[in-house]
Amino acid sequence: MIEHRGIRLTLLLVQAFVAVTALAGGAALMIGALSEGFSSSWTPPSEFLAGSPFSSYLVPGLLLAVVIGGGHALAFAELERHRPWALFGGAAAGFALLIWIFVQMAVIPFSVLQAVYFAVGLLEIGLVLLLLDVHHRLGPRRHSPAARVGEAAGRRT
């Protein structure tokens, strides 16, 4: 039996980490977009936006803060309070993070942070699946080759 308390704590830490860093990153992008003095140090080069629907980092910053940061903060709060929909919220937040990284990689050049946050999104979804005990529910099926091999071995003895 897997220890759910440790998995739950790890998921809470992952969600808190993503919420805080996404809120901070979104705020930095928005401040950089609104303030000329901060734009060079707080935002990526504006050339990265060429070919995208955005003329500044204001909307991407807002989306990062609200969708990713807010989604993870909400998922954290739900899991911390043991709410029934907490794992659904965690899975949705993890998938939102993966989609954010996919879109980001299509728009701007590769960064190590993209790989790190992609791995964090996969970890988050994996932790949710462990808390749902999916690995226990997906045993060999009667029609699967593994089940047939097991049945054949059982008949010989």
Image (cartoon, rainbow, N blue to C red):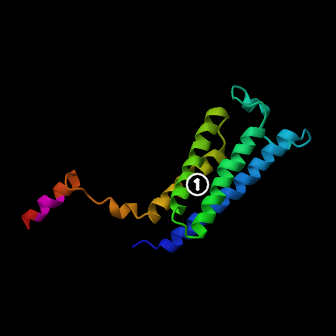
Examine the structure image and report whether residue 105 is included in the region drawn in magenta: no
Highlighted range, magenta: 150-154
Residue 3 position within the rendered picture, expressed as x and y whole percent measured from the top left: 46, 73
Residue at image position (12%, 64%) is 154
Q: Quadrant of residue 2?
A: bottom left
Examine the structure image and report whether residue 153 is included in the region drawn in magenta: yes
Q: Residues within 10 Å of mark 1 (few under 14, many from 20)?
A: some
Amino acid found under the numbered disc labelled 1: Val
Which secondary structure is most common in the magenta stretch? helix
Residue at image position (44%, 63%) is 132
Q: On the rendered image, what quadrant is the N terminus found in?
A: bottom left
Left or right: where 157 falls relative to 28: left
Left or right: where 13 falls relative to 140: right
Residue reaching furthest left? Answer: 156
* Location of mark 1 (residue): 120
Query: What SS does tag 1 mark?
Result: helix
- The reply to whether residue 40 is in sight is no
Q: Measured along the vertical axis of the image, is residue 129 above or below residue 4?
A: above
Residue reaching furthest right? Answer: 37
Residue at image position (19%, 51%) is 143
